[in-house]
């Protein structure tokens, strides 16, 4: 398993070792000593800390920067100018390579979050292979608008369709709309479903969109209206009319939920933000059958669970073709950190969308599409998918041992591939904090769920390293919680008012 991961991992992994105490040397010393082949820490917009000495010895490998640290000073300087949409923990991340991040005070973190399932390959994947085309494209043509033709939007669209067919995914995939993000991909899907409904029923009676509780489809108003969580919807209510919500995996309610007024059904094969909940095959097949009966469009949102994360190119590939979608949305890993999304549609859907129905200023620009073309070639590699499945088994084996050790705290293990969840019976925040202060980044989702979405190129040694630290963190959080200060935030799908 380790050798397989090594074959697909970009070379040049840092060999920095974890330090038990915060060093007394200034950060400038460390930055000057690092191998310069990786991404340089930006200096144009961030103040240098070369004059600061870190004199305080620490009892943890990666203690959060204290209030009198250079990091805190910089954060306090910036905070008045930033809209407070997130509650972030104290570290200030400045560098990444492989599966690791470094903060401004040279603490290293093994990242089990991959930038919310975005950095699937690496923080700077295969730097030479990626840098050459991106640098060339940046010097040649970055943006034209969609008023004019450019080659890479067409090349990427062709690649997505052909790779999807070759992998056994959406067999009706025909055309691609390219945009900037996941929420935009879902907005396009919702609009296309409405257009199909109007085409099939010109009276406009077929206009309802069905989605499911604990789903997350985005924060723009259409996608938000399909995300039935009061925490997100209430501040911006009323929502767009015409949205109905059902219970995930409840086959008995489908016939009443999806009817002749339904133009589209949007569902995640695996709910990421909602708690790493996996749709059953029978549920998705029943949705497909009901959509066929009433003439509705079936949309699979694979923005988080697609592009290799389940050990297949697409999460729905385990289904028979008869349960494939009419529309498939993707983003996140498609750009590996560069903003891009895509909405893949069948020919039946594409025929209903005509010039002027939808558009985007930046979507499909030459730079984004050329980068995504390279990333897609990597994410569609069967060797990568085999490694993902192998790493899943390592995670599951260690999770089972943790559950046996803490049966009252860990109630369930969920997920597929490298989108995995540990359901806790207690607040996971102390575990997140204890893990971070020991050098591993994890995040939460749903209600009291720890979510694991590491880079897909993670090795067996890194899995073992991270889970050993997680075990230490749980020992402290579950047995000595008074020793952990905790950090607010990082609970995306927490109930309103939590």
Image (spheres, grey):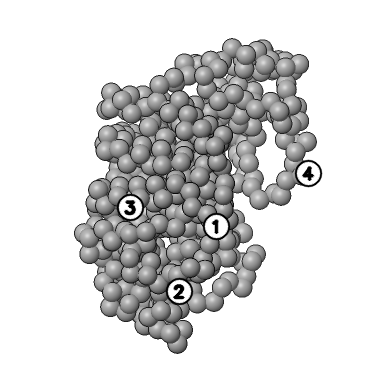
- Foreground label between 3 and 2: 3
Q: Is tag 1's residue or tag 3's residue first in the polypeptide sequence?
A: 1
Q: Horizontal and vertical percent for residue 308?
A: 34, 43
Write down the quadrant of residue 52 in the picture.
top right
Q: Is tag 4's residue or tag 2's residue first in the polypeptide sequence?
A: 4
Write down the quadrant of residue 107 in the picture.
top right
Query: Residue at position x 41%, y 50% from top?
Result: 154
Q: Is tag 2's residue or tag 1's residue first in the polypeptide sequence?
A: 1
Q: CA distance from mark 3 to mark 2?
A: 23 Å
Q: Which residue is mark 2?
A: 194
Q: Which residue is mark 3?
A: 161
Q: How many C-alpha atoms fall within 10 Å of the one at disc 1: few (<14), some, or many (≥20)? A: few
The disc at residue 147 is 1
The disc at residue 80 is 4
Q: CA distance from mark 4 to mark 3?
A: 45 Å
| Residue 411 visible within the image | no
């Amino acid at each position: 398993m380790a050798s397989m991961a090594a074959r697909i991992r970009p070379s040049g992994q840092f060999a920095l070792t974890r330090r038990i105490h915060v060093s007394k040397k200034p950060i400038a010393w460390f930055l000057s000593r690092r191998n310069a082949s990786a991404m340089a820490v930006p200096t144009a917009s961030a103040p240098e800390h070369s004059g600061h000495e870190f004199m305080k010895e620490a009892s943890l490998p990666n203690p959060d920067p204290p209030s009198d640290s250079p990091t805190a000073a910089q954060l306090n300087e910036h905070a008045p100018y930033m809209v407070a949409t997130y509650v972030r923990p104290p570290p200030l991340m400045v560098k990444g390579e492989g599966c690791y991040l470094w903060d401004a005070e040279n603490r290293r973190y093994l990242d089990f979050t991959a930038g919310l399932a975005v950095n699937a390959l690496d923080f700077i994947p295969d730097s030479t292979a990626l840098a050459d085309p991106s640098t060339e494209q940046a010097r040649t043509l970055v943006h034209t608008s969609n008023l004019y033709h450019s080659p890479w939007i067409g090349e990427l669209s062709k690649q997505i369709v052909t790779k999807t067919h070759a992998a056994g995914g959406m067999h009706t995939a025909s055309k691609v709309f390219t945009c900037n993000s996941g929420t935009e991909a879902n907005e396009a899907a919702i609009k296309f479903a409405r257009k199909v409904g109007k085409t099939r029923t010109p009276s406009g009676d077929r206009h309802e969109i069905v989605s499911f509780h604990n789903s997350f489809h985005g924060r723009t108003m259409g996608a938000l209206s399909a995300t039935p969580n009061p925490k997100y919807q209430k501040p911006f209510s009323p929502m767009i009319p015409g949205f109905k919500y059902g219970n995930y995996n409840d086959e008995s309610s489908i016939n009443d939920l999806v009817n002749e007024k339904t133009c589209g059904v949007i569902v995640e094969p695996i709910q990421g933000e909602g708690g790493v909940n996996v749709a059953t095959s029978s549920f998705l097949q029943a949705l497909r059958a009901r959509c066929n009966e009433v003439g509705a469009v079936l949309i699979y949102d694979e923005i988080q669970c697609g592009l290799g994360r389940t050990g297949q190119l697409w999460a729905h590939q385990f289904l028979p073709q008869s349960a494939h979608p009419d529309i498939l949305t993707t983003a996140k890993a498609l750009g590996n950190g560069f903003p891009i999304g895509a909405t893949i549609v069948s020919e039946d859907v594409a025929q209903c969308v005509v010039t002027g129905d939808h558009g985007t200023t930046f979507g499909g620009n030459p730079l984004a599409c050329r980068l995504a073309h390279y990333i897609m070639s990597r994410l569609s590699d069967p060797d990568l998918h085999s490694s993902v499945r192998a790493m899943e088994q390592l995670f599951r084996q260690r999770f089972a041992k943790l559950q046996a050790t803490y049966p009252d705290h860990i109630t369930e293990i969920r997920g597929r591939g490298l989108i995995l969840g540990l359901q806790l019976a207690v607040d996971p925040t102390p575990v997140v904090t204890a893990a971070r202060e020991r050098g591993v980044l994890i995040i939460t989702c749903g209600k009291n769920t720890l979510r694991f979405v590491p880079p897909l190129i993670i090795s067996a040694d890194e899995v073992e390293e991270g889970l050993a630290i997680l075990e230490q963190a749980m020992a402290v959080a579950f047995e000595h919680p008074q020793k952990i200060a905790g950090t607010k935030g990082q609970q995306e799908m927490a109930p309103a008012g939590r």
